Image (spheres, grey):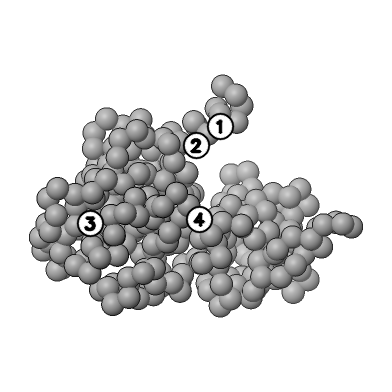
């Protein structure tokens, strides 16, 4: 199979724009700090850590290869998708899955039709394109998919040595899930920013959708923001002790995200 090129990638995006198709985008150097946690160890910018995955409508591919996508109205998008941030954009066409790496130029108004304008995210012409395994990139919405809370136990991590700081733990709700990490929400009344003065590492014990056995995995906080309902959204990355653990966790997460996709398809079809 020939190697993917920027030309074929842009051609696929152009086809998506013709039918208002969507892509999946994530910031790979979200230049954010853990909100409200100034001075917390590990709260500086985290280049290379996957951010939230946003599904955005393709608007246009310009003659110079710039890409215009409809900007999400989610709070997290305004937080993460800023000028100068590097992003990965997943384009799915049939069995082809290509991911391009680009940089955000900014947000502008795009004339959608004679009467309507929308906010558009402008990206530079991609500088790298490669084949992508969807399971490594897709972040499934898991809100309401599990009636069992995720238990977070704070730990002090030093290399491969860790010490549990909180045996009781605190309860969180599963919001989204991917091979690289997990999104949770907690009650803001827990004063989580004070907890983070000790450590940003946790052991998460969770029951994944359609799986009976619990999963215990080391996670590190990379993003935090207040959300409506007096709650906090927490974005975590998975950390692994070895490659065997990585493969085990990824396999279970893939099964869970596949199950979530099936549930969402059935709901859309009314089944």
Q: Position of residue 52 (x, y in %)?
A: 47, 57
How far, Cα to Cα, is label 1 from label 4? 19 Å
How far, Cα to Cα, is label 3 from label 4? 22 Å
**Front of the two marks 3 and 4:** 3
Q: Are marks 2 and 1 in contact (CB under 8 Å)?
A: yes
Around disc 2, counting alpha carbons within 10 Å, would you say few (fewer than 14), some (14 to 19), or many (20 or more)? some
Q: Mark 1 = which residue? A: 265
Q: Quadrant of residue 129?
A: bottom right
Q: Mark 3 = which residue? A: 202
Q: Secondary structure at mark 1?
A: helix
Mark earlier in primary sequence (3, 1): 3
Q: Quick one: 179 or 2, which is closer to the camera? A: 179
Q: Mark 4 = which residue? A: 53
Q: Quick one: 125 or 29, which is closer to the camera? A: 29
Q: Secondary structure at mark 2?
A: helix
Q: Position of residue 234 (x, y in %)?
A: 37, 56
Q: Mark 2 = which residue? A: 261
- Relative to 8, 231 lies left or right: left
Residue projecting furthest to the right: 114
Mark earlier in primary sequence (4, 2): 4
Q: Position of residue 127 (x, y in %)?
A: 59, 73
């Amino acid at each position: 199979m020939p190697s993917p090129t920027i030309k074929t990638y842009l051609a696929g995006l152009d086809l998506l724009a013709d039918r208002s198709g969507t892509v999946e985008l994530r910031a790979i150097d979200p230049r954010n700090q853990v909100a409200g946690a100034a001075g917390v160890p590990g709260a500086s910018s985290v280049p290379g850590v996957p951010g939230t995955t946003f599904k955005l409508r393709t608007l246009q591919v310009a003659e110079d290869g710039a890409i215009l996508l409809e900007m999400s109205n989610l709070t997290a998008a305004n937080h993460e998708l800023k000028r100068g941030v590097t992003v990965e954009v997943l384009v799915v066409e049939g069995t082809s899955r290509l991911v391009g790496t680009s940089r955000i130029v900014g947000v502008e108004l795009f004339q959608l039709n004679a009467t309507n304008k929308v906010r558009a995210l402008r990206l530079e012409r991609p500088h790298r394109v490669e084949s992508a395994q969807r399971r490594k990139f897709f972040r499934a919405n898991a809100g309401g998919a599990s009636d069992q809370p995720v238990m977070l136990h704070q730990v002090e991590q030093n290399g491969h040595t860790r010490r549990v700081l909180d045996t009781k733990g605190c309860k969180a709700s599963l919001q989204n899930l991917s091979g690289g990490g997990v999104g949770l929400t907690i009650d803001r009344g827990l004063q989580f920013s004070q907890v983070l003065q000790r450590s940003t590492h946790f052991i998460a014990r969770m029951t994944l959708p359609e799986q009976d056995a619990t999963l215990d995995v080391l996670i590190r906080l990379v993003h935090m923001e207040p959300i409506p309902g007096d709650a906090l959204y927490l974005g975590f990355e998975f950390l692994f002790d070895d490659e065997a653990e990585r493969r085990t966790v990824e396999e279970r997460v893939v099964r869970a995200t596949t199950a979530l996709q099936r549930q969402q398809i059935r709901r859309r079809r009314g089944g």
